[in-house]
């Protein structure tokens, strides 16, 4: 049974990728109705994971997997407990609705197939991320979500804003991913655990490790960038350049929650320390405030929602950081509630845009009669967002206020932040959900009417689920909230909150929030103008900072390239040979490996003569003033080398060298006589002396090194082998030839291949003429 | 370069050199010589012929394109190596056999064919380079 | 003997490197041709020197008797000579074609791939 279940889970993990592979072809055949088929993939996942609810609620985590890179101890394994299961259900459930929604939203778009493909790939990556057990698969899927997100944000790649947003998201989340990788490796090294399940059962090991703070900061670097915490929040609103289904799915319900997921996942081992409980609430609280304040400023429905998403993520991080059991319960409830209502509201925003032709709240109004179903969905979702009963958002909000009592100074501050944040979120929720529908009908660019079923099915379903889940809170808590909160807290928890309001401090705070929210909503226009004025006064933000950083990087790269690759071969050569000289001399001098002083060699007269000829030939090449001298002296030194080979027992080499030198002289003559190439050097003497110095340092270095080599006893093992076996094994008396064609035949085969390729390359060089060659010559002359 | 004496002597000189190159190639296994040297000698022969009489007669005399000769050489060497595989020994292992012809015993081997291949590659590639450079002189 | 040869090899290196440091492409080529010889002689010397006795097994014997030159460096150098010749020929033709196309033999003026004073790359997205 376990094996069968394991196979099905593996299939579930790869199914989105399979669906992504067939999506383009399927869309060509079925047009937008392909959505109905493709939605079966996430639906299958949803049903499959739904089946685990019972097990997980009973406290049994499901694990499984296959060996991936056994030599490194890396497995492709998964770990399903309350936290990952809730995420998996949200991803697959909302994913199903999003695929359908995308079918309607991009109906007739010529790249719809590609879009399906991307979004299904993302779904697979996200699914893998939350189910991964091993660090390596977690990281791979984490980066895969960044990459697919890049593709989706840049879907409309003909617009520069789209490209910029995509790149920005990739840079920010990609850097965060690297930080996460480093953090995971630190954890791995510190605890010896390479899997989440192993880590979670390691108790206090990580908190006690000396690298705890380093690991924490690195992991937070990953989580904060992914979950758009201030000051990395700027990529998320820009990501609204993506088509609305992407915003609804990635940038509200799923991907941006990956950071929160990671924090919740690691809470049992990384949390419950002073650092954790300081850093997280401060960053989360700041993000909450900044997000809501910036949201007020916006008039575009999607941007308003995007900033509230930033704020909600801040709230989640803050609650996770507070770390008390009730705060975790609140975070869990809010996470689920947020995924439901925010996904719905985004889809509503897209639906309005699709049907009315604009997303600007100032040009929308009175759509309730034209789009009644959309209005219903929007209203239900907005009430949940505002934290009113009987919606899931209400449960979350009550729990949040229960978590934040007024006891300490810090808590009071966080409570104040939460009240302001929540009030502003209620304002935005109402602004998005009510403003376009209520009031007098406004003339919209397109004549608005109700969208097709594909478009309203998603938001309506999510909104209704948000309501039903709250009313039957007992069931929801038992199967979803409690297992998830238990996974986050690392201990079993029980949640009692229900839609029935009961008099408490939390209820009072809720009422304050709602009153404050309604008050701000009524003077929204003035609040917006005030925020706009404040932002104009500041005049700088991380978003512009990103541009400046990227431009600075390009300028820096350009400057560095200009210095390193200045296009002057002289400089390259000089640097190369100076380095060679240093590489030869430095070790010899440092380790005292200089050769012993040699004795004066005793050689015959004709040997000295050949040496002298070689030296004269060399000198003549260097000082040649005309072509003929240079060619002839090159030949002289070559023939002198051949003579040396002959003198020292290498007739094969001597013959080869003779032939090669002859041919070299011939082809050199052929080339040089046809071109007006003069070999002499017209530079000032000082420059020449520098070159002489470098050449001298290198050359003498080589000579000294060689002298040292010859003074070391000679290891003749290889030579003896060839000498002994040349005739016995290879039937050849000329050992040199036997080595070439027999013992080292493979080398020779490679070498003749090189000779052949050189011949081909030369033929190509001579035959092919650049079509623009005349232009270049003209430009030069 | 195109003096009468040179032009008259060049074809004979070239043919002598080619014959010599084959001799050097064949004796290579037991005496100084071999495919590389033989190939270079033959290539110089064609280069001299080309300088003396122009490229066209050389190309006609060679009949095949020099690069085709080089390609054939590479092919021959590879096949000589592959023959060992057919006998179930590693690539390029030398296989030897003795052939009795007119009372003389000849040692035939895959290594010999490998050396022929080297010879052809060197002849082909270097002749090709030399001829290509000489050819440009004419236009 | 090795000492004298070592000194000569040093001279080969000095001259070839000096030529390679020049700006004239033809001098660089001459330098490369000599450099090939220098490297071959280095291998030759490192394998130790032996006068006039080639490593050839005499007729009627199955292995070398007595001291002969070291066959291994010779085998390495033999192929190296041919390869470096092909390489030299290729560079020569490359220089020749570059001169034809660009009208200069000064490496500083060959700036098609890396133009001087090139502005910033595009800063947009």
Image (cartoon, rainbow, N blue to C red):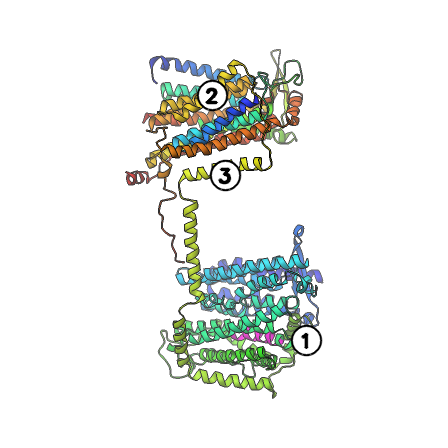
Front-most of A284 and A4?
A284
Q: Is residue C108 above or below residue C82?
A: below
For label 1, the residue is: A493
Q: Secondary structure at mark 1?
A: loop
Percent from the top left, x then y, of residue A135?
A: 62, 59
Front-most of B25 and A92?
B25
Residue A614 - label: 2
Chain where mark 1 sits: A
- The residue under the point 51% across, 26% down is C9
Percent from the top left, x then y, of residue A126?
A: 57, 63
* Badge 1 or badge 3: first in the primary sequence: 1
* Badge 1 or badge 2: first in the primary sequence: 1
Mark 3 surroundings within 10 Å by alpha-carbon count, few (fewer than 14), some (14 through 19), many (20 or more):
some
Question: What residue range appears in magenta?
Answer: A329-342
Q: Is residue C87 magenta?
A: no
Percent from the top left, x then y, of residue B103?
A: 62, 11
For label 3, the residue is: A579
Q: Quarter of the image for the C terminus of chain C: give it.
A: bottom left
Residue sitting farthest toward the right: A1
């Amino acid at each position: 049974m376990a094996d069968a279940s394991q196979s099905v889970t593996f299939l579930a993990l790869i199914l989105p990728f399979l669906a992504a592979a067939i999506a383009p072809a399927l869309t060509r055949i079925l047009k937008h109705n392909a959505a109905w088929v493709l939605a079966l993939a996430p639906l299958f996942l949803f049903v499959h994971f739904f089946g685990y609810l019972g097990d997980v609620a009973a406290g049994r985590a499901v694990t499984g997997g296959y060996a991936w890179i056994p030599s490194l101890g890396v497995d492709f394994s998964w770990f399903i407990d309350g936290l990952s299961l809730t995420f998996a259900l949200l991803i697959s459930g909302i994913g199903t609705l999003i695929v359908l929604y995308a079918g309607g939203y991009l109906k007739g778009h010529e790249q719809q197939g590609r879009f399906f493909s991307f979004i299904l790939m993302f779904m697979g990556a996200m699914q893998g991320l939350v189910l991964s057990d091993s660090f390596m698969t977690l990281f791979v899927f984490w980066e895969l979500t960044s990459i697919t997100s890049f593709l989706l944000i840049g879907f409309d790649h003909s617009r520069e804003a789209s490209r910029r947003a995509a790149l920005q998201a990739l840079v920010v989340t990609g850097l965060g991913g690297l930080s996460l990788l480093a953090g995971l490796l630190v954890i791995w090294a510190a605890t010896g655990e390479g899997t989440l399940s192993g880590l979670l059962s390691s108790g206090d090991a990580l908190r006690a490790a000396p690298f705890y703070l380093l690991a924490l900061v690195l992991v937070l670097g990953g989580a904060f960038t992914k979950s758009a915490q201030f000051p990395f929040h700027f990529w998320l609103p820009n990501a609204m350049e993506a088509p609305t289904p992407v915003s609804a799915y990635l940038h509200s319900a799923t991907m941006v929650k990956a950071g929160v997921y990671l924090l919740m996942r690691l809470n049992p081992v990384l949390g419950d320390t002073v650092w954790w409980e300081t850093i997280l609430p401060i960053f989360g609280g700041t993000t909450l405030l900044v997000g809501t304040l910036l949201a007020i400023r916006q008039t575009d429905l999607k941007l308003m929602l995007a900033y509230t998403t930033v704020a909600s993520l801040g709230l989640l991080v803050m609650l996770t950081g507070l770390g008390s059991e009730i705060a975790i319960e609140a975070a869990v409830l809010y996470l689920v509630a947020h995924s439901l209502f925010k996904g719905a509201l985004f889809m509503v925003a897209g639906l309005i845009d699709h049907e009315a032709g604009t997303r600007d709240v100032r040009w929308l109004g009175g759509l309730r009669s034209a789009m009644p179903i959309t209005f219903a969905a929007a209203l239900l979702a907005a009430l949940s967002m505002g934290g009113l009963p009987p919606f899931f958002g209400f449960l979350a909000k009550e729990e949040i206020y229960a978590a934040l009592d007024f006891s300490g100074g810090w808590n009071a501050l966080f409570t104040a932040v939460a009240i302001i944040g929540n009030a502003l979120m209620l304002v935005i929720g109402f602004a998005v959900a009510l403003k376009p529908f209520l009031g007098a009908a406004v003339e919209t660019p397109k004549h608005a009417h109700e969208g097709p079923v594909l478009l309203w099915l998603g938001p309506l379903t999510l909104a209704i689920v948000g309501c039903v889940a709250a009313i039957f809170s007992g069931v929801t808590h038992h199967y979803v909230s409690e297992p998830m909160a238990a996974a986050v807290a690392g201990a079993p928890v029980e949640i009692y909150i229900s839609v029935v309001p009961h008099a408490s401090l939390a209820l009072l705070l809720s009422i304050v929030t709602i009153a404050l929210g309604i008050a701000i909503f009524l003077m929204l226009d003035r609040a917006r103008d005030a925020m706009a004025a404040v932002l104009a006064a500041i005049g700088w933000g991380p978003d512009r900072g990103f541009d400046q950083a990227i431009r600075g990087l390009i300028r820096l790269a350009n400057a560095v390239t200009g210095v390193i690759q200045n296009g002057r071969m002289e400089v390259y050569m000089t640097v190369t040979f100076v380095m060679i000289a240093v590489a030869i001399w430095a070790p010899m001098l440092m380790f005292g490996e200089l050769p012993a002083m040699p004795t004066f060699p005793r050689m015959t007269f004709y040997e000295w003569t050949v040496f002298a000829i070689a030296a004269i030939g060399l000198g003549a090449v260097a000082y040649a003033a005309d072509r003929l001298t240079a060619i002839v002296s090159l030949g002289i030194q070559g023939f002198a080398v051949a003579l040396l080979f002959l003198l020292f027992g290498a007739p094969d080499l001597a013959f080869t060298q003779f032939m090669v030198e002859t041919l070299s002289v011939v082809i050199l003559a052929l080339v040089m006589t046809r071109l007006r190439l003069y070999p002499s050097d017209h530079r000032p003497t000082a420059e020449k002396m520098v070159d002489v110095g470098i050449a001298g340092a290198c050359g003498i270095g080589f000579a000294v090194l060689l002298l040292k080599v010859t003074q070391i006893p000679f290891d003749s093992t290889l030579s003896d082998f060839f000498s002994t076996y040349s005739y016995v094994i290879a039937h050849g008396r000329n050992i040199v030839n036997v080595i070439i064609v027999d013992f080292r035949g493979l080398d020779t085969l490679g070498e003749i291949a090189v000779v052949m390729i050189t011949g081909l390359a030369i033929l190509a060089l001579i035959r092919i003429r650049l079509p623009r060659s005349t232009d270049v010559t003209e430009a030069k002359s | 370069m195109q003096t009468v004496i040179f032009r008259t002597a060049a074809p004979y000189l070239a043919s002598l050199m080619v014959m010599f190159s084959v001799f050097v190639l064949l004796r290579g296994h037991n005496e100084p010589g071999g495919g590389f040297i033989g190939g270079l000698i033959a290539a110089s022969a064609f280069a001299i012929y080309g300088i003396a009489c122009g490229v066209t007669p050389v190309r006609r005399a060679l009949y095949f394109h020099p690069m085709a000769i080089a390609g054939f050489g590479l092919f021959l060497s590879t096949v000589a190596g592959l023959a060992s595989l057919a006998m179930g020994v590693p690539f390029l292992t030398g296989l030897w056999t003795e052939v009795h012809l007119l009372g003389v015993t000849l040692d035939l081997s895959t290594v010999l064919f490998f050396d022929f291949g080297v010879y052809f590659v060197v002849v082909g590639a270097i002749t090709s380079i030399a001829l290509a450079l000489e050819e440009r002189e004419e236009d | 003997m090795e000492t004298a040869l070592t000194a000569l090899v040093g001279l080969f290196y000095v001259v070839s490197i000096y030529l390679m440091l020049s700006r004239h492409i033809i001098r660089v080529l001459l330098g490369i041709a000599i450099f090939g010889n220098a490297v071959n002689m280095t291998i030759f010397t490192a394998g130790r020197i032996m006068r006039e006795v080639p490593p050839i097994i005499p007729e009627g014997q199955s292995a070398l008797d007595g001291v002969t030159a070291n066959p291994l460096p010779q085998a390495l150098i033999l192929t190296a000579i041919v390869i470096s010749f092909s390489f030299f020929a290729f560079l020569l033709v490359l220089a020749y074609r570059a001169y034809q196309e660009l009208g200069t033999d000064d490496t500083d003026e060959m700036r098609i791939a890396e133009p001087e004073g090139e502005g910033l790359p595009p800063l947009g997205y």
